[in-house]
Image (cartoon, rainbow, N blue to C red):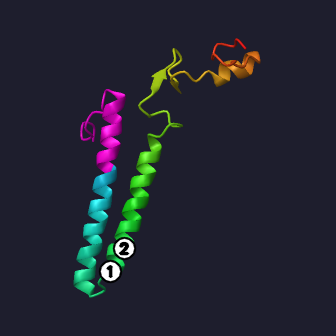
């Protein structure tokens, strides 16, 4: 059904905030579920620890999606072709021309 999903954040920092919020919530909900399971089954810390590990894995996966190598991170810009590239990353351009930057970052020694 169209329209059920909220609109995506418009800014890069909005995406970072969204991912961080989702990461924290995943850990809290997984631990709370583990605590609840431990209370019902009498297995004190086991499901709590399982919830912590699973929530932490989900949080790490979500945060890695916005990391420095990601196209959805806070430091991205779209090229005219619509592809996202990290700002200042000209490695593809350098690879095609064989040009490598010098000490001043502009190709000058």
Q: Secondary structure at mark 2?
A: helix
Checking the image for residue 93, the label placed there is none
Q: Nearer the viewer, residue 33 or 69?
A: 69
User: To which residue does mark 1 refer?
Assistant: 45
Are the residues at dot 1 and dot 2 in contact (C-beta closer than 8 Å)? yes
Q: Position of residue 93 (x, y in %)?
A: 67, 18
Q: Position of residue 92 (x, y in %)?
A: 66, 23
Q: Quarter holding the N terminus?
A: top left
Q: Quadrant of residue 47?
A: bottom left
Residues drawn in magenta: 1-22
Q: Quarter holding the C terminus?
A: top right
Q: Quadrant of residue 46?
A: bottom left
Q: Position of residue 40 (x, y in %)?
A: 23, 83
Q: Nearer the viewer, residue 60 or 2?
A: 60
Direction bottom: furthest residue: 42
Q: Nearer the viewer, residue 109 or 93?
A: 109
Residue drawn at x 27%, y 78% as measured from the top left: 37
Residue 108, relative to residue 68: is it above or below? above
User: To which residue does mark 2 refer?
Assistant: 49
Answer few, some or many: residues within 10 Å of disc 1's Cα (few below 14, many 20 plus, some between 14 and 19).
Answer: some
């Amino acid at each position: 059904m169209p329209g059920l999903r909220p609109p995506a954040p418009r800014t890069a920092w909005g995406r970072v905030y969204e991912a961080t919020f989702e990461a924290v919530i995943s850990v809290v909900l997984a631990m709370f579920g583990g605590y609840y399971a431990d209370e019902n089954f009498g297995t004190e810390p086991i499901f709590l620890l399982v919830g912590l590990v699973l929530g932490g894995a989900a949080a790490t996966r979500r945060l890695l999606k916005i990391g420095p190598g990601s196209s959805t991170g806070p430091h991205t810009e779209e090229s005219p072709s619509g592809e996202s590239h990290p700002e200042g990353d000209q490695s593809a351009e350098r690879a095609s021309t064989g040009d490598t930057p010098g000490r001043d970052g502009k190709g000058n020694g």
